[in-house]
């Protein structure tokens, strides 16, 4: 007998609603939920393979604990005993910063990852915090922090209403979108064109997204900030600046013309390899469109000027009056956002409040660069203790971060490491304890992060589609117990963690004059929370305190968990609307257009005007059926064109003597890897492309399918020294590289 259950898909940022077919406890099918208020039935091949991802036989079923050097199955009790002993010994001997925490990408795709890591970090008090953000979007956080005073205030393009979309370094036809949560992104781009709008794509590769575009510009990698600065220059030069209704909310507009003075289209053309006339046209089109949105993603972030490029994306939206207006780029308002406070000056955003110990990288958003994790473990300095224990949650930095070989060694030298991970993979194989979360079908789901980035305000919650298997522990409970074990409260009831958060949050809310619960008794409010579990009670609390909440009865029609459960396909909260100045938390209470750290970084961008490297540069790519490093073990999602090949332009291939299908050796600052060449004019000349997340050939992993076609780890070509200095974000694109046909290793290259 089969049944169906709803489940929001956690496999990318689009958050589609799925209808799962379940036989017994096994997910045997997945289709798009046509009644989902947001995704309306959309599904992609990854979502359709939910059952295969969920039921992968290599997923760990029980905790593993290292005994006599070997990882063996153990009880949860033994596992947490080992965590408490391992972490506490290091904290007590070497202090809190000697415990590192690494948080990987899937944390934004689980409820556990949203609700518990902040408590863990606060409880540990460590500054050794590393996340996937610094190999991804940290430049955008820094830019938003500086412009708006809030690193999480990220405007998203109004895909459903814009007349003109300028996509920079994003390939939503493969990625399904990022920092712009939109089920059926491809359909939305087609709809834009169907309603007479225009799509421009800036990408060194002629991607599937670029093929849809009215205009594709194959820019030289790493130079987007120059192109965008030259567009801003053009807007000023040609009198096209018109912030419109934004004007009263802006500070520093007068200083911008001088700041971009040197970035004429003529000066930028050579470096970008885009002619000056085209740059001017891009600026004019942006200004002329009734509404327009500039949107930049991975290709604009993981580059040497990632923060400046991210800043310029917003500056262009502002100069053309497109920020915060329908059809432009707007600030979403999620159901679990904090109660909006009245507009007014805030505390602003600080960068570099502390620095990493070895290379003295400034912190950003409380994080240090993931690129620096290996050296923070393997290098002693007089400044303080190296990291001796590591807590890794949903992270595989051995493949995702630069120089995996060095990190691999460093992890092997730790006194103690715990991984919360469903797989024994390149990173978790070093752990002393592995705590496996249940598969997604057995976990509840709500998108705390992505609803704040969604192209339409909406809220959805799905309970576990399948009950927890015997012997399994919910990931929320795993993390709650991990917090207790790591902070000296080992053995306490995990509900203590939720109670602590609820007590603190409500205690604060009742003191806020603008909160609906102002003046109430927090204990009385806590007693009214509903939900079967601690995380559900926390969700209920957030919903009720939030912008659409029932305010614990103050607004009886408002949201609560109960109301959400009564709407299994979600609740639509309407299109994005103008919100300024409310989201601003800058000291001035305005959008600070030329923040000091940005102004101080502009000379470095000016120098880039003169750079014109001649050698080959490396960029990445994503495949629709992939997800970073962790889906190569699912047969349904591998094979075909989803392979770790080096894309190289026919001209470059001919010049270097590279044959299609033949192995080539790649040499970068961090090492060498081998991959088969795929000669294709999809990449522009001078650029080669190798996808990330491959390199599943290390011993001691349990990834039977992935190991059969391991691919090469592109990040081994990086040594971790190339960063965007403002954000600490790794430079993963536009990296100098040598390519040698394998049989002719000794042939000089260029
Ligand atoms: N060269 C290059 N490198 C890149 C990128 C690139 O474009 N080019 N992209 C970067 C980007 S954008 C990102 S976000 C990072 C990602 O970097 P990571 O977050 O380190 O990598 P993932 O492959 O997403 O691995 C996540 C880990 O989480 C585990 N996992 C999966 N599901 C769950 C779950 O439900 N719970 C828990 N606890 N664990 C789970 C997986 O088994 C895996 O070990 O990679 C970055 N690296
Ligand atoms: N199928 C699939 N979907 C995913 C993921 C996945 O691994 N697979 N990962 C998820 C994650 S963690 C993220 S962060 C998102 C990322 O979402 P996107 O940013 O849309 O992802 P990419 O497909 O890497 O697109 C980046 C594009 O930038 C281009 N590029 C490289 N260098 C430059 C440059 O210097 N300038 C410009 N203008 N372009 C450049 C690349 O050619 C590529 O087409 O995708 C998410 N969705
Ligand atoms: S687009 Fe993303 S969220 Fe939607 S089905 Fe595919 S993987 Fe899942
Ligand atoms: Mo990412």
Image: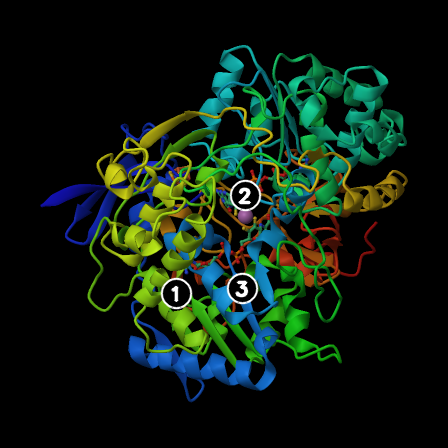
Which of the two marks, 1 or 2, is nearer to us in this view?
1
Q: CA distance from mark 1 to mark 2?
A: 30 Å
Query: Which of pointers 1 and 2 lies earlier in the amino acid sequence?
Result: 1
Nearer-N-terminus badge (2/3):
3
Cβ at disc 2 under 8 Å from ligand 2 = yes
Foreground residue among 649 and 535:
535
Name the quadrant containing residue 57.
bottom left
Give the residue number, with chain letter if any, for mark 1: 479
Name the residue that disc number 2 marks.
Answer: 622
N-term-proximal mark, 1 vs 3 = 3
For label 1, being within 8 Å of ligand 1 is answered no
Label 3 C-beta lies within 8 Å of the nearest ligand 1 atom: yes
Up-down relation of residue 364 to residue 334 (above or below): below
Horizontal and vertical percent for residue 435? 37, 69
Q: Secondary structure at mark 2?
A: loop
Measuring from the top left, give residue 733's x and y in whole percent.
Answer: 69, 47
Left or right of 590? Residue 55 is: left
State if disc 3 and disc 2 touch (CB < 8 Å).
Answer: no
Mark 3 — residue?
Answer: 102
Identify which residue is drawn at 57% across, 75% down. 96
Dot 3 crowding, Cα within 10 Å, few <14, some 14–19, many 20+:
many
118 left or right of 648 in image = left
Q: Distance from label 1 to label 3 (Cα)?
A: 13 Å
């Amino acid at each position: 007998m089969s049944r169906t259950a709803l489940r929001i898909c956690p496999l990318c940022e689009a958050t589609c609603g799925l209808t799962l077919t379940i036989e017994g406890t096994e997910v045997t099918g997945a289709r798009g939920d046509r009644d989902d208020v947001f995704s309306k039935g959309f599904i992609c091949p990854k979502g359709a393979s939910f059952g295969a991802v969920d039921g992968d036989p290599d997923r760990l079923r029980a905790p593993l604990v290292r005994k006599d050097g070997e990882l063996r199955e153990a009880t949860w009790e033994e596992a947490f005993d080992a965590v408490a002993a391992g972490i506490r010994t290091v904290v007590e001997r070497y202090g809190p910063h000697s415990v590192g925490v690494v948080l990987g990408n899937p944390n934004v795709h689980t409820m556990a990852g949203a609700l518990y890591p902040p408590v863990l970090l606060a409880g540990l008090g460590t500054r050794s915090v590393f996340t996937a953000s610094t190999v991804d979007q940290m430049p955008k956080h820094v830019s938003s922090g500086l412009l708006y005073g809030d690193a999480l205030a990220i405007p998203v393009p109004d895909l459903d209403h814009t007349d003109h979309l300028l996509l920079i370094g994003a390939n939503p036809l493969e990625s399904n979108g990022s920092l712009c949560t939109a089920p059926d992104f491809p359909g939305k781009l087609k709809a834009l064109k169907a309603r007479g709008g225009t799509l421009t794509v800036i990408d060194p590769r002629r991607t599937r997204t670029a093929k849809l575009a009215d205009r594709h510009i194959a820019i030289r990698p790493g130079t987007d900030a120059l192109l965008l600065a030259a567009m801003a220059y053009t807007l000023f030069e040609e009198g096209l600046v018109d912030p419109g209704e934004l004007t009263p909310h802006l500070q520093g507009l007068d200083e911008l013309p001088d700041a971009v003075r040197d970035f004429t289209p003529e000066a930028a053309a050579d470096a970008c390899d885009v002619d000056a006339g085209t740059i001017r046209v891009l600026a004019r089109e942006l200004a002329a469109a009734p509404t327009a949105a500039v949107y930049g993603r991975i290709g604009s972030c993981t580059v040497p000027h990632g923060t400046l490029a991210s800043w310029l994306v917003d500056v262009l939206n502002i100069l053309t009056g497109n920020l915060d207006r329908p059809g432009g780029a707007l600030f979403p308002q999620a159901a679990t956002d904090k109660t909006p406070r009245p507009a007014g000056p805030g505390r602003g955003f600080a960068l570099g409040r502390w620095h990493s110990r070895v290379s003295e990288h400034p912190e950003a958003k409380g994080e240090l660069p993931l690129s620096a994790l290996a050296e923070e473990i393997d290098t002693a300095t007089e400044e303080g203790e190296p990291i001796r224990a590591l807590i890794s949650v949903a992270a595989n930095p051995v493949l995702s971060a630069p120089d995996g070989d060095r990190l691999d060694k460093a992890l092997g030298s730790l006194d103690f490491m715990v991984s919360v991970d469903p797989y024994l993979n390149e990173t978790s194989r070093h752990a002393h304890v592995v705590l496996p979360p249940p598969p997604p079908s057995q976990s509840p789901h709500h998108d705390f992060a992505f609803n704040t980035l969604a192209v339409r305000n909406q809220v959805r919650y799905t309970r576990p589609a399948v009950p927890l298997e015997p012997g399994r522990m919910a990931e929320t409970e795993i993390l709650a117990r991990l917090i207790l074990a790591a902070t000296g409260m080992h053995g306490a009831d995990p509900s203590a963690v939720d109670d602590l958060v609820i007590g603190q949050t409500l205690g604060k809310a009742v003191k806020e004059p603008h909160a609906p619960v102002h003046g109430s008794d927090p204990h009385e409010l806590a007693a009214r929370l509903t939900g079967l579990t601690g995380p559900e009670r926390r969700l209920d609390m957030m919903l009720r305190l939030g912008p659409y909440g029932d305010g614990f009865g103050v607004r009886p029609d408002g949201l609560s968990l109960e109301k959400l459960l009564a709407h299994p396909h979600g609740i639509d909260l309407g299109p994005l609307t103008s919100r300024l100045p409310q989201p601003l938390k800058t000291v001035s209470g305005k959008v600070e257009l030329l923040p000091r750290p940005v102004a101080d970084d502009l000379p470095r961008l000016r120098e880039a005007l003169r750079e014109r490297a001649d050698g080959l540069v490396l960029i990445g790519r994503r495949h629709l059926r992939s997800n970073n490093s962790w889906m190569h073990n699912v047969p349904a999602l591998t094979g075909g064109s989803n392979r770790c090949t080096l894309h190289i332009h026919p001209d470059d291939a001919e010049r270097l003597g590279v044959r299609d299908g033949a192995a080539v050796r790649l040499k970068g600052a961090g090492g060498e890897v081998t991959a088969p060449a795929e000669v294709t004019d999809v990449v522009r000349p001078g650029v080669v492309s190798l996808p990330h997340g491959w390199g599943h050939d290390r011993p001691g992993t349990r990834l039977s399918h992935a190991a059969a076609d391991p691919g090469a780890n592109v990040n081994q070509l990086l040594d971790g020294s190339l960063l965007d200095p403002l954000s600490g974000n790794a430079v993963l694109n536009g990296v100098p590289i040598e390519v040698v046909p394998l049989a002719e290793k000794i042939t000089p290259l260029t």
